[in-house]
Image: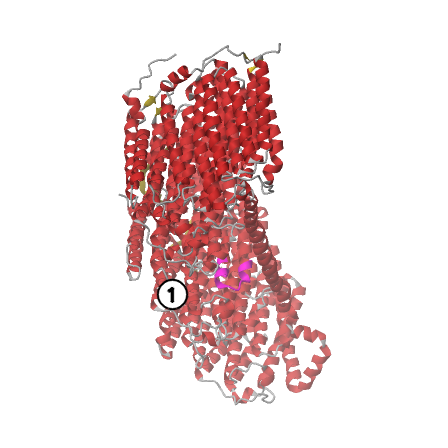
Amino acid sequence: MDTVLFIIFAVVAIVCGFNLIFQKHPISSALSLIGVMSSLAVLYLLLGAEFIAMAQMIVYGGAVMVLFIFVIMLLNAGTEKASSKSWFAQFAGLPLLCLFVAVLAFLIRAALPALPDVRFGRWFGGTAENIGKMLFTQYLLPFEVISILILIAILGAVVLARKEID
Amino acid sequence: MTLWLIPFFPLIGFLLNGLFGKRLSKSVVNLIAIGSVAVSFLYVAALLFKLSPLTTAYSEHYFTWIQSGFLQIGFDLFVDRLTAVMLLIVTGVGLLIHIYSIGYMAHEGGYYRFFSYLNLFMFFMLLLVLSSNLLIMFVGWEGVGLCSYLLVGFYFTEDYATNAGNKAFIVNRIGDFGFSLGIFLTVITFKTLDFEKIAAGVANMPVETTAGVLTAITLLLFVGATGKSAQIPLYVWLPDAMAGPTPVSALIHAATMVTAGVYMIARVSFLYDHAPHAMNVVALIGLLTAVFAATIGVTQNDIKKVFAYSTVSQLGYMFLGVGVGAYSAGIFHLMTHAFFKALLFLGAGSIIHRLSGEQDLRHMGGLRKAMPITFYTLGVASLAISGFPGFSGFFSKDAILSAVYAHSPWMFWIGVFTAGLTAFYVFRAYFLAFFGNYRGHHHPHESPAVMTVPLIVLAVLAAGGGFINVPAWLSTVFPLAEHANASAMIISASFGILGIVIAWFLYVARPAMAESLKTAAGPLYTLIANKYYVDELYTGFIVKPLEGISRFVLWRGVDEGLIDGALVNGLGRTVRGWGGLLRRLQSGSIRNYAAWVFAGSLLVIVVLGLAGGFR
Amino acid sequence: MLPPVPLSWYLILSAILFALGVAGFLYRKSIITVFMSIELMLNAVNLSFVAFSYEYRRIDGHIYSFFVMVVAAAEAAVGLAIILTVFKNRGTLQIDEVDSMKL
Amino acid sequence: MSLLAIVLAIPLIGFFAVLFTNRDSKGPFVVALGASLITFFASLGLIGPVIANGAQFSSVVNTLWIDSPGLQIRFHLGVDGINLWLLLLTTLLLPIGIWVSQSMIAERKKNFFALLLLFEFGLIGVFSALDLFVFYVFWEVALVPMYLMVGGWGASRRGPTAVKFFVYTMLGSVLMLGSILYLHSQAGTFDYVEIMNALASGRVILTSGQQLALFIGFFAAFAVKTPIFPFHTWLPDTYTQAPTPATFLLAAVMSKMGAYGLLRYSVTLAPTGAHRCTSWIVVLAITGIIYGALIALIQFNIKRLIAYSSLSHLGFVVLGIFALDQQGADGAVYQMIAHGISTGALFLLVGYLEQRRQSLDISDFGGIATPAPGLATAFMIALLASIGLPILCNFVGEFLILQGAAVAHFSWAVYAAIGVILSAAYLLWMYQRTFLGKTNEHNSRFADLTGREWASLLPLILLMIWLGTYTQSFMPSISVATAHLLDQTSMSNEYRVNLSPPANATRTLEVANVR
Amino acid sequence: MFGNFQPTSSEYLRFLPEILLSFFGIVIMMLEAVAKGKRTYLGVIALVAIAAAFIANVWAYFNAGPAFQNMIVVDGYGSFFRGLVLLVGFLCILTAFSYLEREGAQTGEYYALILFSLVGQCILSTATDLIMVFIGLEISSIATYILAGFLRDDRRNNESALKYFLLGSFATAFLLYGIAWIYGLTSSTNLEDIRRALTQGQQPIVLVGLAAALLFVGFAFKVSVAPFQIWTPDVYQGAAAPVTAFMSAGPKAAAFAIFFRVFLTSFRPFSERWLPLVWGCALATMIIGNFAALLQTNVKRLLGYSSIAHAGYVMIALTAASQVGTAAAMFYLVSYALMNIGAFAVISHVASRNERHVKIEDLAGLGKREPVIAALFAIFVFSLIGVPLTGGFFGKFYVFQAALNSHLVWLTVLGLVNSAIAAYYYLKIIVAIYMHEPRATTEQLPPPAPSLRLAIWASAIGTLILGIFPSALLSFASFSAAAFR
């Protein structure tokens, strides 16, 4: 049953990923990215990470992507124009990618034969409670520090997007 | 007793005149210059009188000049009978010529310069003569070379003079190249340069081991001698050196400096005695030079050139003498030659002086009325050089020739022939100058006393100098080899007289005949008249090619083209070229950059991951 | 009944998604899309985090991916702000036209 | 506080003092001249101990400079019979350089004087350093001001020339730095004396191969600096482009840095390497001698001519060093000093010619001797000195070098002596075309040497004669020092026969290595 | 599962510098919101903050130790780099005053961003847990992205920011993926634990290699080591000069700090695997940096390339993989920071409004126009070349010594030759300054502001001191480099 789920959503994710690449218009790319994210959320659930799955939907699928779409709309970014400037990326990109995937797949298959099977419901560690506990004990410092990051983000947005420097 | 005073006086003279001469009046300059030489002449006389009989050498050590490792070269002077002879010749003749110069240079510019140079020359010459080791001798040797350069180029605004000066110096340098190598080899062989120590070293040295190296040393030294004493193949500078003022020609290029080579060989005779092959070479070169130069002398029209070639030829005689082992004869001839050749030059000088610079025999003639003293004194000199019986040249030349005869007859015959030739061309010049009608357009009359007196003194010496038995005096230095034979004496004398007669016949009795002979000789004459084109050969085959190679091959080609252009700057260009290529990575396009980063990370993954995996 | 899914499949999936992200970066020509592909890469990484923490039955991985999300959000804010300024100055979102500095 | 430290310090103090003087006043000149003169007189005080014992280093400065767990470096200076005279040459020529700069340098004099003093500081350091690190530091410190002088005050093509000069020299010296570091990784110290003791006592044994590598590293730097054919091509450009005071110092002093390094370091620290390369280097040296002379023969520009001539003369020095025997070494040291003086004088005179004629093309001159006899005479004396006429300084050096070469290998002397002939040829020919002959109208009122110009030349001329006649005031101390130096290398005499180190070398190497 | 997680006061003390910096950063933000007119005093506050943080850093050093469940550790090494980045920040703020004044961008955000970015770099210098590394890196980077584009109306600024941001996040993704793999292989992100796990070594080596490779990519990108140097020239050229100075010194130093820490602690067990890679990267970096710089005419871009080359020298120190090597790298980074900031400070002055004059020929005759500034600039350039008595020389020297002690003969020789080649393009600057006449077009520059002058003088004096009396810093470096061996 969860095999089926995995296969379905893995396929969805991959398809959306490809779609992201092949669509010419940013909006459709954004939508397909959302697709990827939601399917990933499902896979998270399968892996027993309910909190992350939720966060994935809210933070990513929600906040971040909304932001993206908002900007796309704001700048009404049109479809892409073909360009021949990035010759290296154009020609070397694909072979490199194939090589990359091949290498990774080879490494994983070769080196990690004996990983446990994934069974839905076998382990439900990732509850909000546990996460919360961890965040405020073991990972107190990163949790506090990362707030600085948010600050910076605000600051950056203010600096760069503010109308005029008085 | 202090030997160093002898060269010291002229040095003082040089310094005074050189530094302050400009501000001094001529008379003061004269006083300093002549005074210094006179003092050192008198000092030499007194010294020799004190030291006589001087059967053993007397030497003095002053300070160590150069010391490095085993090599220790002192600033030492020493005097033996050989030195004594040279000292007297140098200071005596030098003094006379100094006096003569007062008159000759009276109207020249750079008066003080001239005399300071002369004094400097005297200093170096005396140093050369007095030195008790090869290096000090080399110092004097180079020094006189320098003075010769300075004095030959005395008229430095004239190109012919400066060219002659350079030629003199550089050709001498080539000779000194050999000399210095000889010195190095001597040091390697004997670990010293002192004549006495070397002599001792040679004495207790098994011949079979040393013959080779000694031959090498002596030949190298002889190269030096050929340079200084104008022997084949390095004689070319001497005729040009006549560009200098005539007293200079007399003093340096006739009486003293050019004989230094002969003196040097005599000085190190103990080496030559053990190097028979080298001796043969010396004798041969000497003989060859003698006859070669004599033939050229026949054809010259410039009176000084005639005497110059005769000097070369006479020097050849001397080398012939020392070459066959008759050192004392060589020195003997050196002395007599100093007298009569100096006299010849001074006489010529007085003519030239009077004709205000005219040196061409064809524009002289009939001067015997106008310049009687010059006429007679020059006559004496000519007879002396021709080996006319009773005159000095007769004895010395005979001493050499008889030794040569004992050594090898064929050399003797060539020598005798040369003697005749000498007599011929000297008298040719003499007759052309004094007999017949005056062909010039000046109004000649006798020179002032300051010039004639030295002439007279020298004439006396040239006439009677032969009666000084130099070989006997030198017997303590060179074992006396007595092989005077009457036949040789007669033959050489008669050849000389024959030469004189022919000259008289051709240039006084039947002047027209000379011309017809010239035309008859044709190409041979032109060849000889152009000095066998030796200068042209040297220029064409050595100087010009060297210049060309240096400019076009070495400088433009190798230096600027290959090393700097191709290698150094080429390397720079290559590096910058690579830089240009690497810059191309920076295409400015973000996607390309990402692709590079991605490629790089793949590389790293492969290196770290797979390379690890395949281990 | 299909065989259960080994964890390595998840890893391979994340690898593929990562590669797809890279591909997007290399091949898309709109700055925004390129930026989205980066987000995709981050998601891929998150997947492996979660997968690994399933392996160890420990939730550190979840924490990490949580942090990654926060960072991604922050990055999104800043990145989009930068893109805005670029657009203001150049009036384009074509990534290849932002190459005035080169060589 | 050793005197040497003071001698080293004064130029530096002077440098800062000059910086604080008023640009437009006479202050910079006065301060600079004063500082350099004080340095000179102070440096005279160094002679005494060296005369007493030239083999040992005297008036030593030896304090800990850099002290960290990883690295100890001592600031170690001292003089012996070899470097003392070079140091004195420096301290003597610098005041002269400053003296002439006053008239020869048109603009930004203040900076120029400051740089000159900095240059002196570097040179004194180079010549007196007894620690390889310190040596390298000063080596570069001397380079920078010279680079700035060439580039800042030079002729039209000064910029590229200066860069070429710097980069070329730098390429050489970094390899030397490599050798120094490698030596440190083997011996665990930069201190020259300690390393020499370690080598002598066998505490550190370098294999033949290591020595070769070390030697090549050192040689690269010194060959470029000296320069040795074929690493000389920076020299003609630099000499011609540089302002005359700089050329004067380049030729007279800076070229000695390389030769000194060859003698002091490359030969002693890597004797086997030296022996293995000797024949090659001698070939280069002799090639340089003849090659330089031949090219000098046909130069049109006086500066260029003398530049090539000093390539030829320095070939003699190198030959003497690599004769590796007493006469050769003595001659080399002596020739360094002599060449410094004679070539220095020549370049000064060339500068005076240039000042008067605004050109150095030989064709622009001719017959200068008539209007300017004093100039002509001075030039003749310097010229005679540099063609090695006896009783003038160069003769002694050249004689000893050739003698040493002859002792080592007679044919070397034969080839090298050709250079002596040629030197006479090119210099006399140049002199003839420049000073003799008819005076053309351009030069008809060619000014003779002024008093202050004589003042700059007289010390040099007197030294030429002194060095040429009474060598005993210098030679004993030099001989002692070189003898000691050759002893230190003569442990390699067995290497002469077989170039392989003792069998146990490699093993002891590991012991010797300092991690 | 949960032990005693109550942080002790000393743990807070060890984190005090970061706390101070962020506190003051927030203060500045607040003040900025209400500020009117000149904002210089905000900069002063920032300087105070940095000074305070520096003191705190020293204080923290004296009771060193781990903090917050081994998320960070305060040791000599960490404090050293903390101090370095703080110094960098200080100088860069000094440089920025007059620059922002001139560009009319005098706002508090700039200083706040510098402070926040410093927080990230301080975390990087002390982090001992990969998650902290990640966060620290992000904080530092994102702040720097914004700074790079700070002058938002300037096209070059935008482009620089965009390139830096996109490529930076791209590389960060790789880094993150690497962290994921490390976690997956060792079930931990603490450097020491990772090392322990790897020492037992039942993980498949290939995957360890993969993880290490991905981390390597992330770090190498930040320190602009070949083949990940590609972004550097563009970004450095585009950003405002003071920002470039900051980027080239601060984040780089911090990234190197963590680079060394991670590879010399966690991956030490299989160093023989990655050393050859580092060897190659070091060489490639030097060559690319130096060669590509030979033809540059834009000074900022040229210095960008030169900073690549210098990263190469530091990589040599990493290749040495010894205590001396680490110490050498530490020393080198300090001296590099000083001379580089100095150089950029001078440029920010010479460039004048909108950075119009950043070509080499724009420097023509600076020696005549402003003798003092020119002389100081010359000091920086000679130090970059590596002329003795400057910090640059001693840094190189020490690096090469470390390399030779580790028997890296060839790398040393090649490095030395490289440094000689580098002289060529640095000298072009000197030539322009001293050997060209000022052109008629170059207008008279206003005298440099006191703050700028202070920054330049400080860096110059620092450079010289490092060159002449390096002992103190050197001892501290090599003492604290003992941290991981």
Residue range in magenta is D294-307
Outermost residue, right side: B520
Q: Chain of mark 1?
A: B
In depth, the one of D121 and B80 nearer the eye is D121
The answer to whether residue B156 is magenta is no
The answer to whether residue D298 is magenta is yes
In depth, the one of E250 and C39 nearer the eye is C39
The answer, for residue B486, to whether it is visible in the render is: yes
| Amino acid found under the numbered disc labelled 1 | Phe
Q: Which percent across, then down, holds residue E137?
A: 42, 30
> Which quadrant of the structure image shows residue B518?
bottom right
Q: Which percent across, then down, holds residue E88?
A: 35, 38
Image height check: is A84 above or below B470?
above
Q: What secondary structure prevails in the magenta region?
A: helix
Q: Which percent across, then down, holds residue D48?
A: 30, 48
Q: Residues within 10 Å of mark 1 (few under 14, many from 20)?
A: many
In depth, the one of B543 and A25 nearer the eye is A25
Quadrant position of the N terminus of chain E in the picture: top left
- Circle 1 — which element? helix
Residue at position x 56%, y 58% in the image:
D294
Residue hosting label 1: B8
Image height check: is E109 above or below B148?
above
